[in-house]
Image (spheres, coloured by chain):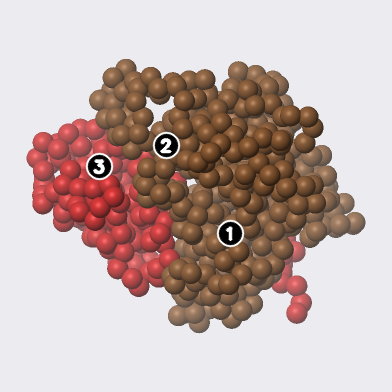
Chain colours: A brown, B red
């Protein structure tokens, strides 16, 4: 590439991290921040130990427990499940042996790895950030290149602080105009996935742009980047701007003073240059996006809440027809059913997609002065101990509890069915998480993905509901 | 890592698009080390009838002709979703050494390469043709030739596929990427000095 050619945000961060390039174009990419948790690391540390290797830069590594742990009071009395307990204990032994900074379970800063990185000021613009978790794309909202890796790659980063990577293609998704009444960042990203499909971003790094993206706060930007993987992209990112810089200035461990000034000079050069080339461009009109909800078992099977379950017989080809039939059987749906009539058993507000303070405020605003419908179990799981404390300072926990929501401790909780918070077979759940895969929230569970405000409305209505019919009573 | 050169094996058709890694191995089986045999977890819930431990006879891997399949042929976006490398381990421990699909989840593709499982991306029409042949002749075999970068279908038709030269070399030689990168330690150290990313003094 000629030195003067306009470059994208991705191109700039990539170029600043290439240690070496192989003849076939594979790059040895330097990694600035390696986030780790209990599930995808045991084998990686075991590999280091077996080979007598060290962690190359422990201080560029941060460990936390989030996937396996209980989010109720039992976390204080030990983990019930023997294998989960072993995984947490193994992480604690590994971080101690290898000198990796660790946030323990009962620390206020503990939380979902993708919530705490930005919140603590560890995830910063221009960085390369990896974690053995596909939703690492969340950190791209900071203007970083952040992506999920497997356990072999975790070991590779621990040992070398680098990864061998193929260059990705550039894709830009522009969302222009004002977001309509009742809609949020979650509705934007679900609409994007509905448009491009779950393989739409394969092989690409997506930059989200346009005035609807620029207008989002950092929490909203993280929600959008979080679900990049559901659109098939390895990473999603948003150019850093004043919103980003103001956010970083409020974090406990972000750079301060002269260090911040120096960093800002670089960060301001990061946004894509005018005329930078994107291999693929997609545009959406923000105003045309209505509150979204998924009905199937792939995030691309998403509709406005006013929609009805599709008819498989109207599908274009045999493979799609078979897939639709299978999804409907799993989800317990009939063609033509109104989404708004679907009763829910469980409501889950949480996960690395939607468990920040802004998400909890949105849910509490809808729940205030109202009651969860009879027979519905509704959980609110803050993304971190710090989010939980902030919510309690604002009285949001009281509003939610009075409405009948459970107020839990921080963790991945009911997003992924590997801790005590699980759906039972056949239960239907309105969930602010990111995946509606078969069995994702528990074997046989049925997931409908939606925004925090929509989830709160579903809890109150006892069925999927249009949040535009559930406007806040007074001010939250 | 076990090298991969050629493979003649039974191929099982799993033609649905978007088969995710949660379906390949449910999360509740992710708390095990690699030394545990992961084969029993492969498609654990999909292989069983809902709410029971009995096998679902309709699931392709449960059919006698396909039980020993070492090649999986799938719809677009195979193994999308979670980064869990255990999805590769479950396939590998079952004996699967190659997956053919129009496209793959990016992280799965990387994980597969690092474990000696070859992901082969073919055009959607070719995959549809292969799926039809496998459905018509259960137990039919497919040949994969990595040095030549070809797949030969049961009807004898041969299709070329792309693979990055470095990945190909690693697979052919059973090369460990980490060992390769460690040979570049001086370059990494020089980069850290140049970019001011050395360890803070203790």
The residue lying at 83 percent from left, 51 percent from top is: A250
Q: Residue A326 carries which label?
A: none
Q: Does residue A189 appear left or right of residue A40 in this picture?
A: right
Residue name at image x 83 percent, y 44 percent: A246
Residue wearing tag 2: A298
> For the N terminus of chain A, which image quadrant?
top right
Residue at 46% x, 32% y: name it: A343
A373 with respect to B118 (left or right): right
Q: Give the image location of residue B133, x and y in percent.
A: 14, 36
Residue under the point 58% across and 25% down: A466
**How far from the left and from the top, in percent, is residue B134?**
15, 40
Q: In this view, does B97 lie to the left or right of A373?
A: left
- Label pair 3/2, CB-CB below 8 angstroms: no
Residue A197 visible in image: no
- Residue that badge 3 annotates: B14
The subunit carrying tag 2 is A
Residue in front for this viewpoint, A440 or A459: A459
| Quarter occupied by the C terminus of chain A | top right
Marks 3 and 2 on same chain: no
Cα–Cα span, label 1 and label 3: 37 Å
Name the residue at the front extreme: A374
Q: Label 1, on which residue?
A: A71
Subunit that carries the residue with mark 3: B
Q: Mark 1 lies on which chain?
A: A
Task: Determine the secondary structure under disc 2.
Answer: loop
């Amino acid at each position: 590439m000629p030195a003067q050619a306009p470059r994208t945000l991705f191109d700039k961060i990539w170029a600043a991290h290439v240690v070496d390039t192989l003849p076939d174009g594979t790059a040895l990419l330097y990694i600035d921040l390696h986030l780790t948790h209990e599930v995808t690391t045991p084998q990686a540390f075991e590999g280091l130990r077996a080979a007598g290797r060290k962690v190359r830069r422990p201080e560029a590594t941060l460990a936390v427990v989030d996937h396996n742990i209980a989010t109720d009071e039992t976390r204080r009395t030990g983990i019930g499940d023997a294998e989960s307990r072993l995984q947490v204990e193994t992480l604690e032994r590994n971080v101690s042996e290898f000198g990796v900074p660790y946030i323990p379970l009962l620390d206020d800063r503990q939380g979902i790895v993708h919530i705490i990185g930005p919140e603590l000021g560890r995830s910063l613009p221009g960085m390369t950030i990896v974690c053995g978790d596909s939703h690492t794309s969340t950190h791209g909202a900071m203007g970083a290149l952040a992506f999920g890796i497997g356990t072999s790659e975790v070991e590779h980063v621990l040992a070398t602080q680098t990864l061998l990577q193929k260059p990705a293609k550039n894709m830009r998704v522009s969302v222009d105009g004002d977001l309509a009444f009742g809609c949020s960042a979650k509705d934007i990203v679900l609409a994007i996935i509905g448009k491009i499909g779950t393989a739409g971003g394969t092989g690409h790094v997506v930059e989200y742009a346009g005035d609807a993206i620029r207008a989002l706060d950092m929490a909203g930007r993280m929600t959008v980047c979080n679900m990049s993987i559901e659109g098939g992209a390895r990473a999603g990112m948003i150019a850093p701007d004043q919103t980003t810089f103001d956010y970083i200035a409020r974090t406990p461990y972000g750079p301060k003073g002269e260090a911040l000034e120096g960093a800002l000079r670089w960060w301001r050069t990061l946004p894509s240059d005018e005329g930078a080339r994107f291999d693929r461009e997609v545009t959406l009109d923000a105003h045309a996006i209505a509150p979204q909800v998924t009905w199937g078992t792939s995030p691309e099977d998403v509709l406005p809440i006013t929609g009805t379950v599709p008819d498989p017989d109207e599908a274009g080809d045999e493979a799609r027809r078979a897939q639709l039939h299978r999804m409907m059987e799993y989800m317990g749906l009939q063609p033509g059913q109104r989404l708004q009539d679907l009763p829910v058993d469980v409501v889950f507000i949480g996960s690395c997609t939607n468990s920040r303070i802004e998400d909890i405020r949105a849910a509490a605003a809808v729940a205030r002065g109202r009651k969860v419908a009879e027979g519905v179990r509704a959980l609110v799981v803050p993304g971190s101990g710090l989010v939980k404390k902030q919510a309690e300072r604002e009285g949001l926990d009281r509003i939610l509890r009075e409405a009948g929501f459970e107020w839990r401790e921080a963790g991945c909780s009911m997003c992924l069915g590997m801790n005590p918070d699980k759906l039972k077979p056949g239960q239907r759940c309105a969930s602010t998480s990111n995946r509606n895969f078969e069995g994702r929230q528990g074997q046989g569970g049925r997931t409908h993905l939606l925004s925090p405000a929509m989830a709160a409305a579903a809890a109150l209505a006892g069925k999927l509901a249009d949040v535009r019919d559930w406007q806040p009573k007074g001010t939250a | 890592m076990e090298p991969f050169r050629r493979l003649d094996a039974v191929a099982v058709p799993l033609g649905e698009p978007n088969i995710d890694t949660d379906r390949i191995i449910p999360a509740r089986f992710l708390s095990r080390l690699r030394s545990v045999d992961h084969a029993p977890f492969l498609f654990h819930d999909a292989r069983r009838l809902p709410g029971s431990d009995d096998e679902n006879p309709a699931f392709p891997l449960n059919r006698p002709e396909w039980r020993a399949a070492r090649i999986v042929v799938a719809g677009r976006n195979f193994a999308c979703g979670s980064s869990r490398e255990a999805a590769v381990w479950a396939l590998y421990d079952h004996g699967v050494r190659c997956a053919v699909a129009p496209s793959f989840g990016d992280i799965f593709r990387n994980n597969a390469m690092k474990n000696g499982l070859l992901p082969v991306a073919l055009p959607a029409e070719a995959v549809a043709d292969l799926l039809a042949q496998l459905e018509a002749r259960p137990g039919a075999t497919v040949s994969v030739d990595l040095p030549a970068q070809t797949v030969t279908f049961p009807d004898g038709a041969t299709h070329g596929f792309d693979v990055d030269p470095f990945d190909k070399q690693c697979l052919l030689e059973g090369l460990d990427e980490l060992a390769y990168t460690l040979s570049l330690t001086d370059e990494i150290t020089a980069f850290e000095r140049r970019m001011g990313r050395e360890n803070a003094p203790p």
